[in-house]
C-alpha cells in the first residue's frame, strides 16, 4: 500500500555535514539498483530537489510544515511517493532546527515524526574521535519520538580514524550504516544563495551525482539502509495522498474565444525555483501549462492567456535577459493588456524597469539591484489588495530568500502585508499583475490557482 511506502529521513547535527551528498548519492545508488525512488526535501529549498530529480528521474518535492501546515506533510509525501519502492527525504539544517521562535515547527525532526520515518544521522567526523559518541547520544536522546536508526560517518580521514569512531559509537547502541572518506569530486559549487542549480551545470551536475552515488555505494550498507526503510510501516494518521483536484475529463478549459486556456511558465537556467504542485494545480484548474525559457525564446508561447514567473537567478543572467528585447516587450504587452501575471522573487526583478542598471520588462515602475544583505526567513502574510492570485484578506505563509533590493518595495496597491516577524507591506498589484518577493506554496491554498485560471479565462 502507498501508506506503507518504505522511507528514510537523512538528517544531520548541523548544516554542512553532508546531507545533500548522502541523500542524493543514496537516491542515485538505489535507482541504479532498479528501485523507483521518491525524492523529497524538508523545507522551502528549491535547489536540492533539482539534484534529487537528476538522481532519481522523478520530480523532487518539498515537505514544509510551515508553508503548508503539518496536516499536509503526509498527504504531499504520499502524492509524491505514488508507485515508488522507497522514499528518501533530505532534511534541512540541523535535525531539530526549524522556523525561528516556533519550537519544532518545520524542523526535520517534526517531519520525521509526521511521517513515522526512521532517521539516518550524517555526522561530519573530520575533527573528532571519541566525542562523536556524546554528539550522537545527545541527538538520539533529545526527543524520544524521533527514531534515529543509524549513523553515517562523513569525511573520515584514515582507517585508524574509522576504528576510533566505531569504538566510540559502540557504547551508544546506534549502528554505523556507512563511512565516507573525504572526496573532492562530489563537491558542488556554491554562490550567494547556496548551491548552483542543476539547470546551470549540465554535464557537470550529472558527473557530480554519479560521484555521489559511487561514494555512497562504496561506503554505505545499502541493504541495511533499505531494511531500515522497509521497517517504517504505515504512516501514522491514516492520511490519503494529496490531490491537486480533478483533472480535466476531456480538454483543457477554453477562453471566451474558444481557444485552449494556455498559461506560460518561465523556466530555463534563470528561473529554476518552482514547486511541482503549482503546475499540477494549474492543470487541474483547466489550464494548458506551457514552459518557456526567457534566455532563449523571443516570444511567449502562442495563445498565452496568463504568465507565471517564479524564482531563480535573474541577477546572474541579467545581461542575457536584457538582451532578449523581443521577449521583454512581449511580457510588457501581455501585462499591459490586463492578463494575469504571477511573479515571485526573480519574477519580480524581471518585471522591474531595470536590474543592476540593465533594462528589464518595465512592467513595474521600480528598479532592482544586488545587495550585500541576505533577506531570509519564513513570513506570515495576508493579501492586502485584490489580485488575479488572491482576494484581499487571503492569509498565506511564505518564505523570502534573496540578496537583492527593489525600490520602491511596494506599489500603491501592495501585494502582501507581513504579519510576522515584522509588520510591513510588500509587492505590487497592478492590472492583472501580482508581483512579490514572497515565495508561497499553492498547495496550502489551492484556490489561488483556480482563481488565477478563472482570471485567465475572463481577462
Image: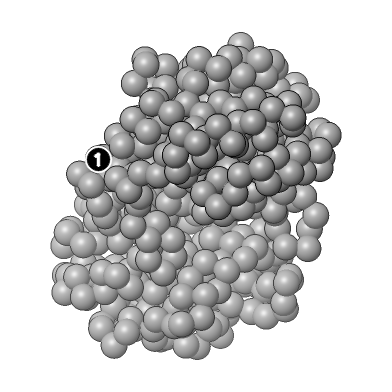
Query: Camera-side residue: 158 or 287?
Result: 158
Q: Which residue is mark 1?
A: 207
Q: Residue at x 46, y 51 (%)?
A: 46
Determine which quarter of the picture holds residue 136: top right
142 vs 82: above or below: below
Query: Camera-side residue: 137 or 279?
Result: 137
The image shows residue 345 at horizontal and vertical percentages of 46, 68
**Relative to 65, is 79 on the left or the right?**
left
**Relative to 32, is 411 on the left or the right?**
right
Q: Is residue 202 visible?
A: yes
The image shows residue 145 at horizontal and vertical percentages of 81, 33
Q: Quadrant of the N terminus?
A: top right
**Relative to 231, is 192 on the left or the right?**
left
Q: Residue at x 55, y 45 (%)?
A: 125
Determine which quarter of the picture holds residue 296: bottom left
Q: Residue at x 61, y 19 (%)?
A: 228
Q: Is residue 442 visible?
A: no
Query: Camera-side residue: 373 or 10?
Result: 10
The image shows residue 206 at horizontal and vertical percentages of 26, 40
The image shows residue 162 at horizontal and vertical percentages of 52, 35
The local crowd at label 1, few if under 14, some if 14 to 19, many if 20 or more residues have their Cα within 10 Å, is some
Q: Residue at x 37, y 15 (%)?
A: 34
Query: Camera-side residue: 132 or 91?
Result: 132
Determine which quarter of the picture holds residue 216: top left
88 vs 418: above or below: above
Number of labels in the image equals: 1
Residue at the farthest top position? 1
Judged from the image, the secondary structure of the residue bearing numbered disc 1 is helix
Residue at the farthest front position? 160
Amino acid at each position: 500500500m502507498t501508506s506503507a511506502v518504505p522511507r528514510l529521513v537523512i538528517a544531520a547535527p548541523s548544516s554542512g555535514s553532508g546531507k545533500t551528498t548522502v541523500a542524493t548519492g543514496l537516491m542515485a545508488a538505489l535507482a541504479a539498483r532498479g528501485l523507483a525512488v521518491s525524492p523529497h526535501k524538508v523545507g522551502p529549498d528549491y535547489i536540492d530537489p533539482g539534484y534529487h530529480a537528476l538522481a532519481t528521474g522523478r520530480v523532487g518535492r518539498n515537505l514544509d510544515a510551515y508553508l503548508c501546515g503539518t496536516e499536509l506533510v503526509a498527504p504531499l509525501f504520499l502524492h509524491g511517493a505514488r508507485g515508488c519502492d522507497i522514499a528518501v527525504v533530505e532534511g534541512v539544517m540541523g535535525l531539530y532546527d526549524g522556523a525561528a521562535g516556533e519550537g519544532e515547527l518545520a524542523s526535520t525532526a517534526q517531519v520525521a515524526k509526521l511521517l513515522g520515518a526512521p532517521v539516518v544521522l550524517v555526522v561530519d567526523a573530520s575533527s573528532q574521535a571519541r566525542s562523536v559518541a556524546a554528539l550522537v547520544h545527545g541527538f538520539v536522546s533529545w526527543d524520544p519520538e524521533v527514531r534515529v536508526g543509524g549513523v553515517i560517518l562523513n569525511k573520515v580521514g584514515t582507517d585508524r580514524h574509522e576504528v576510533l569512531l566505531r569504538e566510540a559509537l559502540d557504547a551508544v547502541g546506534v549502528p554505523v550504516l556507512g563511512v565516507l572518506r573525504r572526496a573532492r569530486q562530489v563537491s558542488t559549487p556554491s554562490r550567494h544563495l547556496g548551491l548552483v542549480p542543476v539547470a546551470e551545470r549540465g554535464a557537470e551536475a550529472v558527473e557530480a551525482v554519479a560521484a555521489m552515488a559511487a561514494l555512497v555505494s562504496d561506503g554505505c550498507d545499502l541493504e541495511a539502509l533499505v531494511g531500515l526503510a522497509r521497517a517504517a510501516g504505515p504512516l501514522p494518521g491514516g492520511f490519503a495522498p494529496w490531490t491537486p483536484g480533478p483533472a480535466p475529463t476531456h480538454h483543457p478549459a477554453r477562453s471566451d474565444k474558444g481557444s485552449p486556456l494556455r498559461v506560460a511558465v518561465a523556466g530555463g537556467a534563470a528561473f529554476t525555483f518552482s514547486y511541482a504542485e503549482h503546475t499540477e494545480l494549474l492543470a487541474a484548474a483547466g489550464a494548458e501549462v506551457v514552459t518557456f525559457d526567457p534566455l532563449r525564446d523571443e516570444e511567449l508561447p502562442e495563445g498565452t492567456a496568463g504568465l507565471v514567473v517564479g524564482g531563480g537567478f535573474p541577477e546572474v543572467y541579467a545581461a542575457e535577459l536584457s538582451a532578449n528585447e523581443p521577449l521583454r516587450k512581449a511580457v510588457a504587452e501581455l501585462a499591459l493588456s490586463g492578463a494575469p501575471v504571477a511573479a515571485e522573487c526573480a519574477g519580480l526583478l524581471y518585471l522591474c524597469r531595470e536590474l543592476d542598471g540593465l533594462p528589464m520588462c518595465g512592467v513595474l515602475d521600480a528598479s532592482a539591484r544586488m545587495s550585500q544583505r541576505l533577506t531570509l526567513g519564513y513570513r506570515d502574510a495576508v493579501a492586502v489588495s485584490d489580485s488575479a492570485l488572491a482576494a484581499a484578506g487571503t492569509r498565506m505563509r511564505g518564505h523570502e530568500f534573496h540578496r537583492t533590493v527593489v525600490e520602491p518595495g511596494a506599489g500603491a496597491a501592495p501585494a502582501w502585508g507581513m504579519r510576522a516577524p515584522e509588520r510591513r507591506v510588500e509587492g505590487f498589484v497592478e492590472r492583472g499583475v501580482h508581483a512579490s518577493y514572497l515565495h508561497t506554496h499553492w498547495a496550502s491554498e489551492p484556490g489561488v490557482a483556480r482563481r488565477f485560471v478563472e482570471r485567465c479565462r475572463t481577462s
